Amino acid sequence: MRFFSSVIVLIILLSSCADRPATQAPLLAVSNPQEKQDNLIKFTVNGKEVVTAGWTISRVHWSFDPTKEWLNITTDMHKEKRTIGVNLAGSVAGVYTLEEGGSFKKKSHGDYKPDYADFLNGYSFISGEFNLTEIDTVRNIVNGSFYGTVINTKGETLTISNGQIINGKLKPGVTQL
């Protein structure tokens, strides 16, 4: 009886495939993950493109300033070792300027790491902008663009350009840190 049932299922599957037009795409087509462009973050460092995703995109209240809501954006170090992490002094759409020493001034600040695992080789933003065009707390997405200049402790600078956040996945709620 089990054999007979298996044959019937196989016949149904084969006959349903035979009715499909030859021009129709395969049923199990694998899509390119970049075509969908969800939670995608792209940028260029000195002319070399980096394509990654958002690791953490969240609204936060820092303990040093609990009345102000910030936006924390970190790229996914598991997908790409070259990472960017920023803390923007606000959580609504707009332009956030990055400047040297921003963290000490309680202003927008961030860093770039050529290799996330190499903690001693980091670069801090000394200039730049994050232009967030959309922060949707209902659909939980962030969209925008960014650029800047970063410097390490040796005085070496790198240029970050063509930055894009495409449907970045915003964590719901506000985190207390």
Image: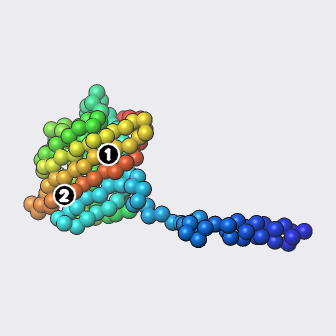
Can you tell which quarter of the image residue 16 is in?
bottom right
Residue 76 relative to residue 7: left or right? left
Residue 46 against residue 107 in the figure, above or below: below
Q: In x, y percent, where is residue 40?
A: 36, 55
Label 1 or label 2, whichever lies nearer to me, is 1
Give the residue drawn at x 38%, y 43%. Answer: 141
The three-letter code of the residue at mark 2 reads Ile
Residue 173 relative to residue 93: left or right? right
The answer to whether residue 143 shows anywhere in this view is yes
Q: In x, y percent, where is residue 136?
A: 37, 37
The three-letter code of the residue at mark 1 reads Asn
Please identify the residue farthest to the left as the structure is shown: 155
Q: In x, y percent, where is residue 119?
A: 26, 60
Q: 65 and 136: which one is in front? A: 136
Residue for badge 2: 160
Give the residue drawn at x 40%, y 47%. Answer: 169
Quarter of the picture containing the C terminus is top left
Tag of residue 153: none
Specify which label sits upstream in the sequence, 1 or 2: 1
Residue 107 relative to residue 119: left or right? left
Residues packed near mark 2 inside 10 Å, few (<14), some (14 to 19) or many (20 plus) = many
> For the residue labelled by badge 1, is the local secondary structure a helix, a strand or a loop?
strand
The answer to whether residue 55 shows anywhere in this view is no
Can you tell which quarter of the image residue 105 is in?
top left
Q: 55 and 137: which one is in front? A: 137
Quarter of the picture containing the N terminus is bottom right
The CA span between labels 1 and 2 is 18 Å
Residues packed near mark 1 inside 10 Å, few (<14), some (14 to 19) or many (20 plus) = many
> For the residue labelled by badge 2, is the local secondary structure a helix, a strand or a loop?
strand
Give the residue drawn at x 34%, y 44%. Answer: 142
Residue for badge 1: 143
